[in-house]
Amino acid sequence: MATLIRRIYHGYRYINEELSDPRTQDYFLIGSPWGCFSIIAFYLYFVQDLGPNIMAKRKPFNLNRIIQIYDLIQIISCSYLFYKITRMVWLYFLMKVFDLVDTVFFVLRKKQQQVSFLHVYHHTGMTFGTWVVTKFLPGGHITFLGTINSFVHVVMYTHYLATSLRISKPWWKKYVTQLQLTQFCMIMVHFILLVWAEDCGFPKWTAAVMIPQNLFMIMMFGDFYYKAYIKKRKSNANGVSSDLANGKLKSQ
């Protein structure tokens, strides 16, 4: 038993200290995995259990002004990351932690139906994934993901803010989803190219993680897009046709 514990301890130190990039080892929340794990664990506990129980007998919070400020911070931060993403890899990770607040707002506003598997999976995966990247691979090939994702978030939170201020209409969300799908396709192609690249200097094993991951996200977001926009539009069209037919029969 003592030998097993010793091996686990040495394995943990090897992964956490020897494999990690020394440039980010002293950054906040990066030196040890426990800070990131604790945030994700509390996030999952809050949005799935604690938050809904707290809100069960309470009225939804009016968070419009807070959300507008949050959206504005997201726009400014993501714009800066899109402009300059080198040492910003760490700040990108912190932004993914900050993104978790999205779900907290849903819970506090009693919009639990929006706390979907896709939403929670995406936020949790991005938080843990960016922690891994910041600790072990803070630069190189992977920065393309952060760059394009920051641009998408600038557009996405601009839409949220404009909708909240009644400047934009909700139907614009369809194009944001299209942009997100385009993003996943570009990232997947980017990692497919890594497989054939010679002497790139970036670990090829990352392609084995990122290609299936982005394919999964394309499938999930594609399914959401189909149900929210294509299937719904067909249902509405059929409903209108039925109403017209019923109206015609009644008039006869």
Image (cartoon, grey):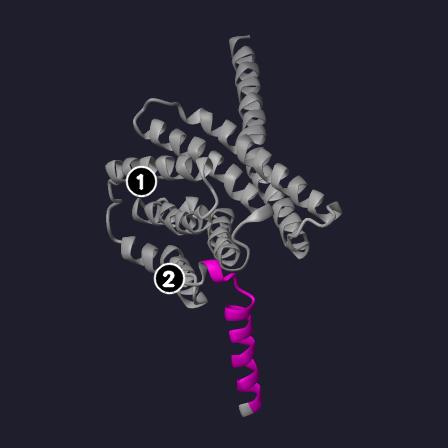
Residue drawn at x 45%, y 48% as measured from the top left: 87
Residue 47 vertical placement versus 114 (above, below): below
Question: What residue is pinned by disc 2?
Answer: 42
- In the structure shown, which secondary structural element does the residue marked by tag 2 occupy? helix
Magenta span includes 16: yes
Does the CB distance between marks 2 and 1 fall below 8 Å? no
Image quadrant holding the C terminus, namely top right
Magenta span includes 8: yes
Counting from the top left corner in percent of width and height, residue 25 is at: 44, 63
Q: Left of 120 or right of it: where is 67? A: left
Q: CA distance from mark 2 to mark 1?
A: 20 Å
Counting from the top left corner in percent of width and height, residue 171 is at: 45, 25
- Label 2 CA crowd tier, 10 Å (few <14, some 14–19, many 20+): few
On residue 70, which mark appears? 1
Q: Amino acid at mark 2?
A: Phe
Residue drawn at x 57%, y 18% as measured from the top left: 241
Of tags 2 and 1, which is closer to the observer?
1
Q: Is residue 127 visible?
A: yes
